[in-house]
Image (tube, grey):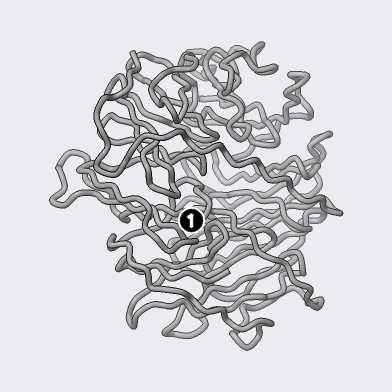
Amino acid sequence: MFRESDDAEPANATPQEPPPPEPPSVPPRRRTWVALIVIAVLAIIVWQVASRDRPEAAPATSIPTTSDTETPAPEWAGPYETAITDSKAGGPPLGDVVMITPWVPPPILTPPTTPYSIAAFDLATHMVTLRLSSQKELYLLGDTSGLVVDVNNQIRVFNPVTGQLISQGDLPSDDAGPIWAGQGMILICDGTHGRFCRSTMAAPTTCVWESSTSLESSPVFGNGKWVSTAEGVIDMVTGQPAPFGQAHEMQQPTGGDNAAEVYYAGDSRIFQVYKHFTSSGITTTYQPWDIMADSPVSPAVEASAIIADASSPVYIAVTNWDGKGSYAADTTTAYSWQTGAILWTKQTETAAEDYAQFFNGYFITDVVGVGVPSPGWGYPPVALDVNTGEIAWQPVGQATFVGLSGTMIYLEVPPASTFDALFGYDTAQNFFPVLSSILPGPPGSTCYPYIAGTFAFCLTSGGAIYIRQA
């Protein structure tokens, strides 16, 4: 049974009703169907940037110096101490609040000599709103409606802005924990009892509905609207069967080369995903799906990853996995959502060596960006024309992708041997360089840049935060 805990939160933490979820933003209409794909090993958080009228510029062919940019480098506020050294910023999307956590989690079997500590920092108020410590790693989920923390077989829900405790409850088994949280809801997977439990942030361990476990590791899709389970697709809010995904046998047939798995994935565009397991490897196909008619839109395609958005009639398939455990040179193909016709295809020149190549998709302006992450410098993103696949823009020189905000793309580049800098390009104005700012920090210290909420900020290894004022 799921039950609520009678344990009290530490001093000054009192349960309260969760704040209502923020309404979804409505994307502006665009004149052209567009796409931008960016490669990154960093978490990507949206930052709104005010637009300005700027002159036309040719596509950037090299990373500019400070004097090449139109506007002077903005000042950085700080430092603001978080008291967490050797840390990184990340966590769930909490608006202007970011989570500061250690780079290295505590060992699983051996208790650490010092507690594992995390902090929530509000970039708008320059304040630490919450501190938590544990002998085990703290798992974080949620959004602006609530920060969900899973630790020591217990769920705690906090207001990320105030740090106040909203609710808490004990999990039913050691093999149970939240796997998704947002919009005031929590989805718990209980492996011991083989079921899902959808609860609320006000009562995190009281089930609103239950269902059997899923076939795949990321069952939530459709921006949190649907759950793909072994019984079919379920509506997240009601727990009732969805209008699609019920007629298909979503079990795994057994026996040699016939093992298969069917599930659904995607956000604004939904795909039926079919995985075929054979003795020689794994084949994955993605088929555009009409969720109202519960039928295919166009033929299935084989791919390692899919990038799609409802704002565009084009979707992108990336293949970099040979199905036998090896990574190969990437093949990127643009397909028509309605017909499945191939619009263009392109192959990268460099095959992966000892690292994987991952893709995250974004649909902005008139290009689709494709890049390769690397353990070091040297692989900046590449922007391709969505209609032809030709290179529209690529910065020349060493660069690391930092994040996207609206139509802005941000890179960290070394303009001099002793300084790192944050550069920003406006993709809506032909990648015009609009920001060049030397990253702050004490001498000999590296300040790692991030984009979050309405701010750019950087974090030093000593746990200090510098914020670029909006």
Return the residue found at the far bottom. 67
Q: Position of residue 182 (x, y in %)?
A: 52, 35
In front: 219, or 120?
120
**Left or right placement of residue 350 versus residue 1 in this view:** right
Quarter holding residue 233: top right
Q: Which residue is mark 1?
A: 42
In front: 207, or 451?
207
In front: 461, or 64?
461
Quarter holding residue 432: bottom right
Return the residue found at the far right. 31
Q: Position of residue 451 (x, y in %)?
A: 53, 61
Disc 1 element: loop
Q: Quadrant of the C terminus?
A: bottom right
Q: Position of residue 108 (x, y in %)?
A: 22, 40
Q: Residue at x 43, y 31 (%)?
A: 179
Quarter holding residue 430: bottom right
**Left or right placement of residue 291 versus residue 160 in this view:** right
